């Protein structure tokens, strides 16, 4: 019995086809097979947010999704989203507000913040806190992260007017 599967997917705009062990999770696939190391493996239980990846436009926990489940999907990692400049304002705000230190959790926070702002362009501080509550940071505390997201929300609203 073959315990490998063939998968084909788009990762950051590039078509990828591989034969992988059936039990390979998506974050391990992008990190070790594709060498896209921006998404991290933290808790391996889906609670820390370090493994956040975007699949078909929605964020998922890459440690909880099998690579085989992404067959045919469009996958975007922090590298692809960063290269597109989609989150450049969030990246700048995180830097300016000192909302990152070691950087381990930052990719997950950035992808989560982008999803929040795409769903709710005017979140309250409480809504920001609630939306990012599945992402853990052991260095910065959350005040600066909330400040950065709030600032970008305001700037994006102002630019849209």
Image (cartoon, rainbow, N blue to C red):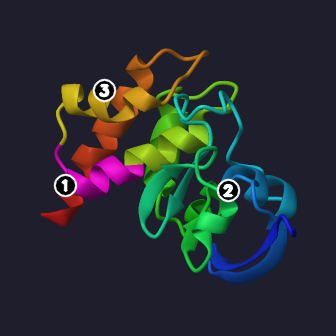
149 or 49, which is in the foreground? Answer: 49
User: Which quarter of the picture shows residue 16?
Assistant: bottom right
Q: Label 3 crowding class (10 Å Cα cut-off): few <14, some 14-19, many 20+?
A: some
> What is the quadrant of residue 105 in the picture?
top right
What secondary structure prevails in the magenta region? Answer: helix
Looking at the rendered structure, the secondary structure element under dot 1 is helix
Residue 129 badge: 3
**Would residue 83 be seen by someone viewing this image from the given angle?**
no
User: In the image, residue 87 lies at what x, y percent?
Assistant: 47, 56
Q: Which residue is mark 2?
A: 26
Q: CA distance from mark 1 to mark 2?
A: 34 Å
Q: Mark 3 or mark 1: which comes first in sequence?
A: 3
Query: Which numbered disc, 2 or 3, marks the residue that appears first in the sequence?
Result: 2
First in sequence, mark 1 or 2: give its number.
2
Look at discs 1 and 2 and give the one toward the viewer: 2
Q: Give how far across and how far down residue 93 sits, in percent.
A: 45, 40
**Horizontal and vertical percent position of residue 88:** 50, 56
- Residue under label 1, please give it: 157
Element at label 2? helix
As for residue 118 lying within the magenta part, the answer is yes
Q: Real-space Cα distance between discs 3 and 1? A: 19 Å
Residue 121 x/y as whole percent: 20, 52
Name the residue rendered at 58%, 65% in the picture: 76
Give, as a single range, the part of the protein colored magenta: 114-122
| Secondary structure found at label 3 | helix
**Which residue is at 35% across, 28% downward?**
146
């Amino acid at each position: 019995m073959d315990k490998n599967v063939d998968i084909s997917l788009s990762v950051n705009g590039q078509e990828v086809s591989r034969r992988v062990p059936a039990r390979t999770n998506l974050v391990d696939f992008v990190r070790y097979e594709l060498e896209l190391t921006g998404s991290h493996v933290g808790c391996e239980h889906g609670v820390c947010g370090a493994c956040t990846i975007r699949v078909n436009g929605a964020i998922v926990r890459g440690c909880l999704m099998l690579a085989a489940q992404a067959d045919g999907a469009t996958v975007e990692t922090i590298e692809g989203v960063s290269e597109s400049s989609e989150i450049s304002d969030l990246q700048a705000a995180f830097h300016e507000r000192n909302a990152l230190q070691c950087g381990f959790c930052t990719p997950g926070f950035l992808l989560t913040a982008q999803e929040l702002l795409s769903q709710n362009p005017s979140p309250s501080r409480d809504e920001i806190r609630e939306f990012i509550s599945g992402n853990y940071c052991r260095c910065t505390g959350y005040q600066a992260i909330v400040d950065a997201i709030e600032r970008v929300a305001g700037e994006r609203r102002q630019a849209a007017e």
